[in-house]
Amino acid sequence: MSTISTIITHEVSLSGTGTYTSPLDITSTGGVEVGGGYAVYGGGTKSWTVENSGTVTDSNGTAILFRDGGYVGNLAGTALIAGGVDIAAGTITIPSTVINAGTITDNVIAVEADGSAVVRNTGTGTIAGFSAEARGVIIERGYVYNAAGATISAGWYGVKSRSTGTLVNHGNITAGIGGGAYLGFGGSIDNTGTITGSYGVAISNAVGSITNTDTIIATNSADDGVSLDGGSIDNTGVILGPHTGILVSGTSGSRSTLTNTGTIVANSSAAGIGIDFDYGGSIYNSGLIAGVEEGIIAGDLITMTEGGRVLNFGLVSGTERGIDGTGNGSVQNSGTIIGGSDGVQLSATDGTLDNFAYIFAMATGGTGLSIDVTTGSAYNYGVIAGGTGVYWSFSAGDVVNKETIAGTAGIGVKLEAGGYVKNFGSRPERRAALIYGYAEGIYAANLRNNAGTVANAGTIEGTGSSGIGIEFLNAAISTTAPRAR
């Protein structure tokens, strides 16, 4: 062991014997201050150890460089390493470790650790990359911990793992033109602090998991709050992404899960999507999911392009569509879903809706529920309302109404290809079921030579001055309610 307790102005080269051996202790009165090359250097012969309570600075190079792994402790709150820490993996298999309670800065990469690495930013520690293209922390793989009160900031990436990584953040991570946090080959992110970047957080090339109880923010209009190549997300905090709040892509056949009891918002984009599940999965929402219109085009709220399931007990709001299911799947709503042109749109081979609460389309020509599926069903135990209440366009429809379906500017239930509408009350103590439209209560056509059948034990009416209760082609009408579902 060797000790530096005064300021020296030449490179310190560590060795097994001689003046500067490992472990090296730099006291609070000590320091190594140089203007090029390396302030402290450990060659490729062993794993090195430096503990700094003073200053290690290099104004034109790297403050600390180890060629073969090692440990750097920047232990005191006043300790400073300016010029960054770079630990190469070499042939050593033990983890490279950096523990910081002071300040580590650089204009390129503040902390870089190859191989299996552990970086812990504790107390009120600061790790900062100052230039526009600087990175805060880069590891090959391993674990990054940022404590409450600690800060990692950079002009490019805040935290990056080139391969599988784990990030636990209780403090503040801020990035500029890159992401707040990026894991290059799967892993996990647990955030109870704040992560901000051009995009918020991303896990690529393998499944990952994200748990957020505080705040994740993307600042660039084309970027996402959370991007994931399949996996799981549990959000009880706030996720904001101008382009997409949460984007889950992955590969065909991948199924992902989201549990949201917090807030997810696409907050300032012309094509803002609250949640985009490219390859389906399960979404449970008892919080808020919203896509905000920016300019002319407004985005969809929840998009499922390859099947999935949405369970909503909260609020889903989109300026174009509340939920857009373009793959096989189901929607069960016990909360509120609001859209502009469509409250819910299902367009695939198979799609089902069970509504126990409220679905609204706010545009005058909007549709509460739009279904374009080969086989499917719509069961309503709440309220579905829009300019048109329910529009079934492709196949014979199957609509069961026990409460209210309203077409405030057009038709209550419109079946383009025939089908079956059953209108009857849920329970004897509740009022009878109601289907109404300004023009027609129910319209059933025979686009595909399917008959239309209406079984009614409630009220069906056209409320306009020339309104029609039921208009149909090749339809049969029964006034006897079928057995309740």
Image: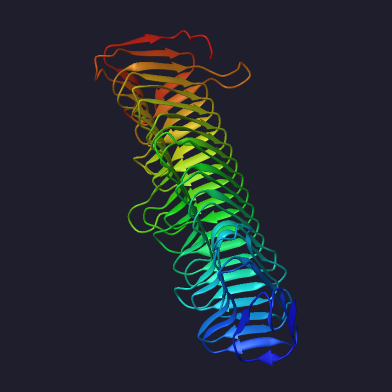
Relative image position of residue 35 (x, y in whole percent)? 54, 89
The figure's colour scheme reads rainbow
Residue 436: name its quadrant.
top left
Residue 361 horizontal side relative to residue 148, left or right: left
Image height check: is 210 above or below 354? Answer: below
For the residue pair 36 and 250, the one nearer the viewer reads as: 36
Residue 6 horizontal side relative to residue 483, left or right: right
Residue shown at the point (49%, 75%) measured from the top left: 108
Relative image position of residue 12 (x, y in whole percent)? 62, 83
Relative image position of residue 238 (x, y in whole percent)? 58, 54
Residue 372: name its quadrant.
top left
Image height check: is 189 above or below 3? Answer: above
For the residue pair 410 and 359, the one nearer the viewer reads as: 359
Residue shown at the point (39%, 34%) measured from the top left: 306
For the residue pair 186 and 314, the one nearer the viewer reads as: 186
Instruction: Look at the image and tell me whether residue 432 can be seen.
Output: yes
Residue shown at the point (69%, 68%) measured from the top left: 149
